[in-house]
Image (cartoon, rainbow, N blue to C red):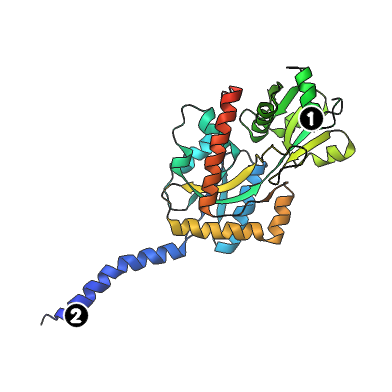
Amino acid sequence: MPFHRRKFLQLAAAGLAAPAFARAALAEAYPARPVRIVAGFAAGGGVDITARLIGQWLNERLGQSFVVENRTGAGGNIGTEAVVGAAPDGYTLLLATVPNAVNAALYGNLKFNFIRDIAPVAGIIRVPMIILLHPSMPVKTVPELIAYAKANPGKVNMASAGNGSAPHMAGELFKMMAGINMVHVPYRGQGPALTDLLGGEVQVLFATAPGTTDYIASGKLRALAVTTAARAEVVPDLPPVGDFGMCAPAKTPADIIGKLNREINAAIADPGMKTRFAALGGEPLPGTPAAFGRLIADETEKWAKVVKAAGLKPD
């Protein structure tokens, strides 16, 4: 059988091109199987609800299941560790939030470096905190709260949803900025903290909006201010504290991150999704992966200062 050099070169070129074509086709096919979104907190909370809303959107847009997995414990570290150790192929994602930035300073023995070991994908929403008081407190403005706390050091009990939680860190940041001393009383979630605030067992709670508006409207609780992205006029120096976003393991392919970023930005721009996020008290947090990465770095630096100033330790 004669040897045809031209035919051989054509076959060889086709053989070399095949792997590159296969890789391109594989990337275009993402996701080709179910994707896991890890939420580091219990079902029913803001993190879980946000993950499920985004998961449903991605399911409908990309034609593949995005399944939320609640991996609770250690302030979200167990879930984060599961994602950091996963293959960087886009099939394991993390719903990241404030504790991910806080834990870098709060825990001294983490098995990962959050900034180094994750790839930012997209911001999702920013949830403000409401400063709530029991009506028995003789204050009606933020300056009056600060003055009262200074006149009564250590006598004002500040509840939180748990050590290192977003409400706790909001309160600690407020204490640090105002130079006041309020006693931190941690609970296992916002629900129990809210119950004791209603009963007058504690006097102050930094809380997320869901589950609080009816109590404010009825006068059972007093709202002093809201920490928003635009910064509330009554507390112009109090920054927002409740950022939610999506992350993936480091080294996840850029085309997969880009695809997820485009879809998440489309989700938070959709009128129907905006309405659903508004019910959580959240406002959209659009942007590029790089912008979300800068936010993570800034938040990590900010909360490290708060952890150090407050002398916080993990439970």
Q: CA distance from mark 1 to mark 2?
A: 84 Å
- Write down the quadrant of residue 103 in the picture: top right
Q: Where in the figure is residue 14, as x and y percent of width and height? A: 27, 73
Residue located at (45% from left, 65% from top): 28
Amino acid marked by disc 1: Pro
Q: Is residue 100 visible?
A: no
Viewed as shown, does residue 11 lie left or right of 265? left
Residue 46 - label: none
Report which residue position mark 1 lands on. 143
Quadrant occupied by the C terminus: top right
For the residue pair 279 and 123, the one nearer the viewer reads as 123
Front label number (1 vs 2): 1
Dot 2 corresponds to which residue?
7
Q: Is residue 72 left or right of residue 181?
A: left
Q: Residues within 10 Å of mark 2 (few under 14, many from 20)?
A: few
Name the spot of residue 109 as percent of width and height, x first.
46, 27
Amino acid type for the residue under numbered disc 2: Lys
Percent position of residue 189, x then y = 68, 32
Mark yes or no: residue 129 visible: yes
Of helix, strand and loop, which one carries label 2? helix
119 sits left or right of 218 in the view: left
Residue occupying the point 67% across, 29% down: 177
Q: Residue at x 46, y 64 (%)?
A: 29
Q: Is residue 87 above or below residue 223?
A: below
Q: Earlier in the sequence, mark 1 or mark 2?
A: 2
The correct choice, above or below, for 223 with respect to 121 in the image is: above
